Amino acid sequence: DQQVKQNSPSLSVQEGRISILNCDYTNSMFDYFLWYKKYPAEGPTFLISISSIKDKNEDGRFTVFLNKSAKHLSLHIVPSQPGDSAVYFCAASGQSGTYKYIFGTGTRLKVLA
Amino acid sequence: DGGITQSPKYLFRKEGQNVTLSCEQNLNHDAMYWYRQDPGQGLRLIYYSQIVNDFQKGDIAEGYSVSREKKESFPLTVTSAQKNPTAFYLCASSIRGLEAFFGQGTRLTVV
């Protein structure tokens, strides 16, 4: 039973345009959500997070939106750059207060120059 | 420099052997985690520890064992009972409730 889902395995976007990556979750006990960027054969790098008490968090070109009623979050990257090409994972935590992180399956973003 | 160090980067194991993957952090984080990544799949939680001398099973703990004798260290042993050990293994640490930081990973291959 996958509690965190990323239904789009891949996404291609033109340089300079907006990239929107989506993530859905099923467990209403999650209260902290994170996005990570990962290159092949490397560890994931933390990008941005959002607490369930907020619906938006922004950091430079990255914005995360949280819709609790829909159990949906999204990562917006504006403007997209070729260096953004990587696999993006969303993660959720806070389940039962154990602070373990549950990850989605990832979306491969390709930014075309 | 503060961070998480995993070693070795590449590891080869013969069938039936146990191997231990090292994970050390100097971030003074209480919590540490082990994940496994397979091609086309996300990161699946093997074990996690929120405090020294305590750890819990994740979603795919069978065939693995861990110890947490020191705050800085959380080694993972892949035992011969793990049927499909070939994968990319990632260690992470965090202050409880905040973002996790990952090491660079260990690629384990069974030969």
Image (cartoon, coloured by chain):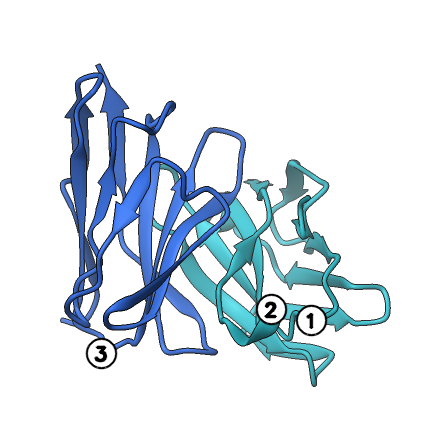
Chain colours: A cyan, B blue
Residue A29 tag number = 1
* C-alpha distance separating marks 1 and 2: 5 Å
Instruction: Name above or below for residue B80 compared with residue B50.
Output: above
Looking at the picture, tell me which residue is in the foreground, B95 or B60.
B60
**Callout in the foreground (3, 1):** 1
Instruction: Name above or below for residue B107 compared with residue B27.
Output: above
Label 1, residues with CA under 10 Å away: few <14, some 14-19, many ≥20: few
* C-alpha distance separating marks 3 and 2: 23 Å
Say which amino acid is labelled 2: Gln
Query: Do tags 1 and 2 sit on the same chain?
Result: yes
Say which amino acid is labelled 3: Asn
Residue B95 visible somewhere in the drawing: yes
Q: Which residue is located at x 33 percent, y 26 percent? A: B86
Residue B28 tag number = 3
> Residue B52 at what x, y percent from top left?
24, 72
User: The residue tagged with tag 1: helix, strand or loop?
Assistant: loop
**Marks 3 and 1: CB-CB under 8 Å?**
no
> Residue B36 at what x, y percent from top left?
40, 41
> Residue B40 at what x, y percent from top left?
53, 30
**Marks 1 and 2: CB-CB under 8 Å?**
yes
Q: Quadrant of residue B37?
A: top left
Q: Which residue is located at x 40 percent, y 38 percent? A: B62
Of callouts 1 and 2, which one flags the residue occurring earlier in the amino acid sequence? 1
Q: Which residue is located at x 70 percent, y 61 percent? A: A74
| Residue with the mark numbered 2 | A95
**Chain where mark 2 sits:** A
Say left or right for A16 vs B27.
Answer: right
* C-alpha distance separating marks 3 and 1: 27 Å
- Of the 4 image quadrants, the one containing the N terminus of chain B is bottom left
